[in-house]
Amino acid sequence: MSYKIQITNSIEELSEFFARLLIDRVNNITGDFHLALSGGSTPKIIFEYLAAHHQNTILWDNVKFYWGDERCVPPTDPQSNYKMAHDSFLSKLHISTHNIFRIKGEDEARQEVDRYSSVILLQLKDDFPRFDLIMLGLGEDGHTASIFPNQKSLLTSDKICATAVHPGTGQARITLTGKVINNAANVVFIATGKGKSKIIDAIINKKDNFKDYPASFINPKEGQLYWLLDKDAASLLHS
Ligand code: 6PG
């Protein structure tokens, strides 16, 4: 598994590093840049930073926006990953709504899985979708996107998207599958805070029961994996 770890002193420094990754890739691509966004509190801070500091440094018109996962709720629901990204970021960019491909959490989940899978295939024009960059958060239980430890079969599913259920809340979700995530050109884990330090140490150093954690199986076959961490989240890595 080849990966790059970037440890930063603050979430602002981490956000700036992520922005520079995007500048380097989005601004130098011919054609569309297919970017899948993540939900979560850490990505929200990054979105706010991008909206505040990088409206004009990144060629956002080159970007087609997707989601790595979504909660099965309406787009107006505070739980919606789309709503979080829209309110904190996308609504502040001067981009066409035609470049935003949200997962319709308000619709029947299995039908939406089929619809979203066809949207991805149509837009990426590829037999098996290869996103340019997939942004991922990390749960303290080792989940990523909405692939939870008790649903690890989603890591090897041949589907593009699948339904999932949050094991704690029972909330229905829709998620990209592990094979799609591992087919991306760039996969960027973003995690901050001491609460993530133990799971990050276990996954990166293959310790304890790391194989229980879905994030342990994220390793793009022909792509680059990044771990963007603040110093608290990375605090056990050197032990
Ligand atoms: C979601 C995310 C999920 C999230 C992690 C980390 O829909 O909630 O896709 O995978 O990224 O749970 O979330 P935090 O950054 O809030 O810890």
Image (cartoon, rainbow, N blue to C red):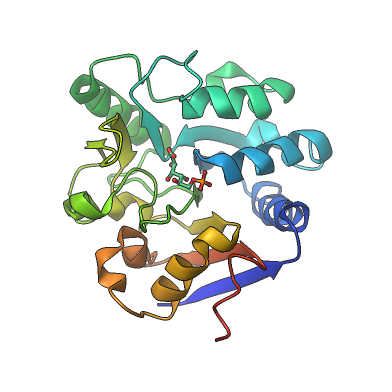
The image shows residue 204 at horizontal and vertical percentages of: 44, 75
User: How many numbered marks have been drawn onto this rendered protein structure?
Assistant: 0
* Residue 122 sits above or below residue 192 on the image: above
Regarding residue 94, the answer to whether it shows in the image is no
Quadrant for the N terminus in the image: bottom left
Measured as percent of width and height from the top left, residue 98 is found at 54, 19
Report the residue at 28% width, 54% height from top: 179
70 on left or right of 5: left
> Quarter of the image containing the C terminus?
bottom right
Of residues 58 and 10, which is closer to you in this image?
10
- Note whether residue 109 is visible: yes
Q: Residue at x 58, y 17 (%)?
A: 97
Instruction: Judge left or right: residue 66 versus residue 105.
Output: right
Q: Position of residue 13 (x, y in %)?
A: 77, 58
Classify residue 116 as left or right of residue 185.
left
Q: Place residue 53 in its image quadrant.
A: top right
Q: Position of residue 101 (x, y in %)?
A: 46, 25
Image height of 183 relative to 239, above or below: above
Q: Which one is nearer the viewer's eye here, 105 or 182?
A: 105
Residue 183 falls in image quadrant? bottom left
> Which residue ends up furthest to the bottom in the rendered image?
239
- Residue displayed at 31% across by 65% down: 217
Above or below — where is 184 with respect to 220? above
Describe residue 83's horizontal placement relative to residue 8 as left or right.
left
